[in-house]
Image: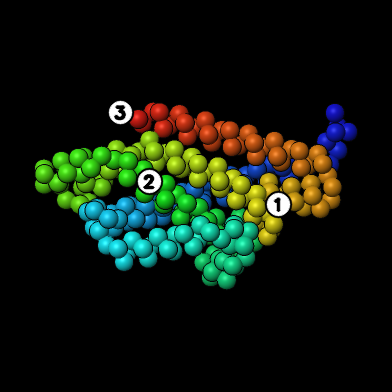
Amino acid sequence: MMGWFANIVWSDIGQATLDTLIMLFASLALTIVLGVPLGVLLFLTGEGQLAQSKLANRTLGLVINLLRSIPFVILLILMIPLTLLLVGTSLGVAGAIPPLVAGAAPFYARLVEGALREVPRVTIEAAQAMGATRFQIIVKGLLPETLPSLISGATVTAVALVSFTAMAGVVGAGGLGDLAIRYGYQRFQTDVMLVTVVLLIVLVQLIQFAGDYLSRRFDYR
């Protein structure tokens, strides 16, 4: 058995897994914090909505679409000056988080916008008829109504972030992707590559399972 895993240093695998989890959950939290307001703004400024504004909607949509259209590996490189400004380094776990958020937040914002569009117009009109403010309609009406969809969107985004963290290994961000590139690919250590791939698959399955459970748990419809 040891012959199959002769190149494995389990302490390195453990540290790489921890780095991946830190990158994943830190960037996911920031993605949700940024993505929900962006998605709400996209929805509210859309045609026929509470704060309709073609200029604001098109400008925000353009910025989001531009960020979404840049391949993540290129975004990593483009953001190096900004990453240095924000966290003081472009390497390691800290250096990976800003580009991870920049790559995932626009994606999640579009999912939030789509979820909000699924809310029946009559729900908003009923809230307005009862004298609810715009803020109350959003916080007490729209967001609770779309919570299962928001959780599902966050699950999809988290799975995408797992792939992003693996790609971040190209620029020395650490984690399982970095380990797979440095040892599995560059040094032809197939056993290291195999272990990292299996761990990433397990991580994605756990995220999907947790996301599906939470989505069902908070679906009161």
The amino acid sitting under disc 2 is Gly
Whether residue 34 is visible to the viewer of this picture, yes or no, is yes
Between circles 3 and 2, the one closer to the viewer is 2
| SS class, disc 1 | helix
Q: Which residue is mark 2?
A: 114
The percent position of residue 94, horizontal first and vertical second, equals 58, 58
Asked where in the image residue 70 lies, by quadrant, the reply is bottom right
The amino acid sitting under disc 3 is Arg
Where is 120 relative to 48, above or below? Answer: above
Between circles 3 and 1, the one closer to the viewer is 3
x 26%, y 46%: residue:
139
Q: Farthest residue toward the left? A: 130
The label on residue 221 is 3
The label on residue 178 is 1
Where is 190 relative to 96, above or below? Answer: above
Q: How many C-alpha atoms fall within 10 Å of the one at disc 1: few (<14), some, or many (≥20)?
A: many
Asked where in the image residue 78 lies, by quadrant, the reply is bottom right
The label on residue 61 is none
Left or right side of 109 for 103: right
The C terminus - image quarter: top left
Cα distance, mark 3 to mark 2?
18 Å
Q: How many C-alpha atoms fall within 10 Å of the one at disc 2: few (<14), some, or many (≥20)?
A: some
The percent position of residue 173, horizontal first and vertical second, equals 65, 56
